[in-house]
Amino acid sequence: MNEAARYDVIAIGNAIVDVLAHSRDEVIDELGLTRGGMTLVDTARAEELYAHMGPTAQVSGGSAANTLAGLASLGARCAFIGQVADDQLGEVFAHDIRAAGIDFTTPARAGDPPTARCMIFVTPDAQRTMNTFLGASQFLPAEVLDLDAIADSAVLYLEGYLWDPEEPRAAMRKAIDTARNAGRKVAFTLSDAFVIDRHGDDFRALIAQGQIDILFANAVELAALTGIDDFDEALASLSSKVPVVVATRGEDGAVATAGGERAQVPAEPVARVVDTTGAGDLFAAGFLFGHVRGRPLDECLRLGALCASEVISHFGARPEVDLARLAAERVG
């Protein structure tokens, strides 16, 4: 743990409440949803989809917030910056993230749009089809950033999804400058290929300027960012530009490179995959925890794989066991 920093990781991301429901395969087709993907929806579509959901579970979500929940469960000191509205779901989000042991002080936003929510249809094969109404989360202004907290965090973790809207993009650029001026590390998760399609030039510029210290991607995102289909070639091209690159490959495990070193781990075995929501988010949590604790690269990957395996073994994108105890038993 970085004793010189107040927080191990501070994250900026979408403040979203996940609304999850089990679904038949036929419903995905009937509603014209993109199976296994993430689609942005407007207010009307969000209401239509909600009406077609069965019994739901509501839990605070959002990619970066899920990662922090994993980090906090592992024992890291964390803070979150994200925008909710002054409404019931906003209160749900704030309560849940604080209950997880994460500092959250971003003031709620008055008026419309309401707090973001993601309608997640989970089919019998555990695949999740996400439909996200971004609502208030798109309106995170630079003025609400806690710059002192960012400067006092070992790692600033940024969620690619939030790069899409203009206001939070400007806030994230300011946060990057603040972290770098304080000598802190900047970690970035690419989030989804559609984000790269829209903002790949921005991401490639950040990399070329040396603004990103740790980059998280899956195999599809890696290809989209580099324009190289071969996984190993794509990874090598990024490894020469980013100090630490972490690439996940689903059931084929994960690979990381750092300082000329390359490490690889298989996926952690799971008795039954129930819901893949949050697998990448929790992988990032485990890896970052190992990183801020100074663990070897292969141990960071093993922690990531372990956290991902826990979250896909149950419904929802937040850990349901004490990850610190699990990590101590399985990784040491």
Image: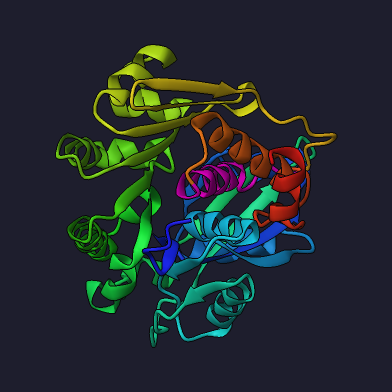
Give the overall secondary structure of the magenta segment: helix
Furthest residue toward right? 271
Q: Is residue 199 left or right of residue 327?
A: left
Query: Residue 236 falls in which quadrant of the image?
Result: top left
Q: Is residue 217 left or right of residue 119?
A: left
Give the residue displayed 32% in from the left and 71% down from the top: 139
Residue 276 belongs to magenta span:
yes
Q: Is residue 12 visible?
A: no
Residue 63 belongs to magenta span:
no
Give the residue displayed 41% in from the left and 61% down from the top: 11
Q: Residue 126: where, in percent of width, then height?
A: 74, 39
The chosen color scheme is: rainbow
Q: Is residue 20 visible?
A: yes
Q: Is residue 134 left or right of residue 95?
A: left
| 145, above or below 36, in the image | below
- Identify the magenta region: 275-293
Give the residue displayed 51% in from the left and 34% down from the top: 296
Give the number of marks.
0
Q: Residue 260: where, in percent of width, then height?
A: 34, 21
Q: Residue 162: where, in percent of width, then height?
A: 36, 56
| 259, above or below 76, in the image | above
Q: Is residue 275 left or right of residue 220?
A: right
Give the residue displayed 17% in from the left and 59% down from the top: 181
Q: Residue 8: where, in percent of width, then height?
A: 45, 60
Nearer to us in this view, 43 or 288 = 288
Question: Which quarter of the figure is the C terminus placed in?
Answer: top right
Query: Residue 302 falls in which quadrant of the image?
Result: top right
